[in-house]
Image (cartoon, rainbow, N blue to C red):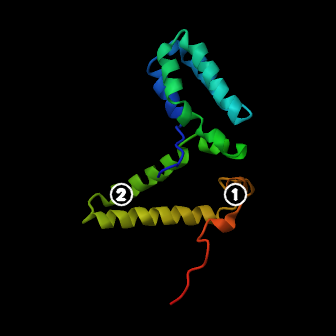
């Protein structure tokens, strides 16, 4: 998917950081890194990441390198409307979907062919989609989606297909 953004989950990133620092420093490092995600706008988010990397880099050079290497992926959420930030900073919804697919495939265990597996996973995804549509609350507020797609009429084909 050329041009698609990739948001790295901040929880998983923190787990990776914890693997390279002493356990007694984990709380301080985590609190410092969380300040990156508490900024009011995209410019401040990225500036705070640089500040945090420099601050932690004095004591933990590996953490500084990790932060700078992951800067684009950790701060991708900041390119979206701020109402979406909390929802896209984590991969929890995707993990829930994967767990449900795994649960259903574990029940079947053996598939006669790849198409059978594809049919099951597609059915699971369609079912989840239908649940999301029927649920009264939206995961991402509809009004804020207009900031991403201001001209919804341009998403489809520019002209309707002509019959023969």
Is the residue 122 above or below the residue 57 in the image? below
Q: Nearer the viewer, residue 41 or 101?
A: 41
Q: Nearer the viewer, residue 54 or 125?
A: 54
- Which of 88 and 95 lies nearest the eye of the viewer? 88
Answer whether residue 92 is visible to the viewer in this image: yes
Expressed as whole percent of the image width and height from the top left, the position of residue 146 reads 72, 57
Q: Is residue 29 above or below residue 121?
A: above
Res. 105 mark: 2
52 with respect to 147 (left or right): left
Q: Which image quarter: residue 138?
A: bottom right
Q: Above or below — where is 5 with respect to 54? A: below
Q: Is residue 10 visible?
A: no
Q: Quadrant of residue 32?
A: top right
Q: Is residue 159 above or below residue 104?
A: below
The answer to which image quadrant residue 45 occupies is top right
Q: Which mark is residue 137?
A: 1
């Amino acid at each position: 998917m050329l041009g698609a953004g990739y948001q790295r989950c901040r929880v998983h990133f923190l787990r990776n950081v914890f693997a390279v620092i002493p356990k007694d420093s984990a709380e301080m490092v985590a609190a410092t890194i969380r300040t990156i995600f508490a900024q009011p706008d995209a410019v401040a988010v990225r500036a705070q990441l640089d500040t945090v990397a420099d601050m932690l880099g004095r004591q933990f050079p590996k953490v500084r390198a990790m932060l700078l290497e992951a800067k684009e992926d950790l701060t991708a959420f900041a390119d979206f409307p701020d109402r979406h930030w909390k929802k896209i900073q984590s991969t929890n919804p995707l993990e829930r979907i994967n767990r449900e697919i795994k649960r259903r495939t574990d029940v079947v265990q053996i598939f006669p062919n790849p198409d059978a597996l594809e049919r099951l996973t597609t059915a699971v995804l369609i079912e989840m989609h239908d649940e999301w549509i029927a649920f009264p609350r939206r995961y991402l507020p509809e009004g804020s989606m207009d900031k991403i797609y201001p001209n919804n009429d341009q998403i489809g084909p520019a002209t309707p297909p002509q019959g023969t």
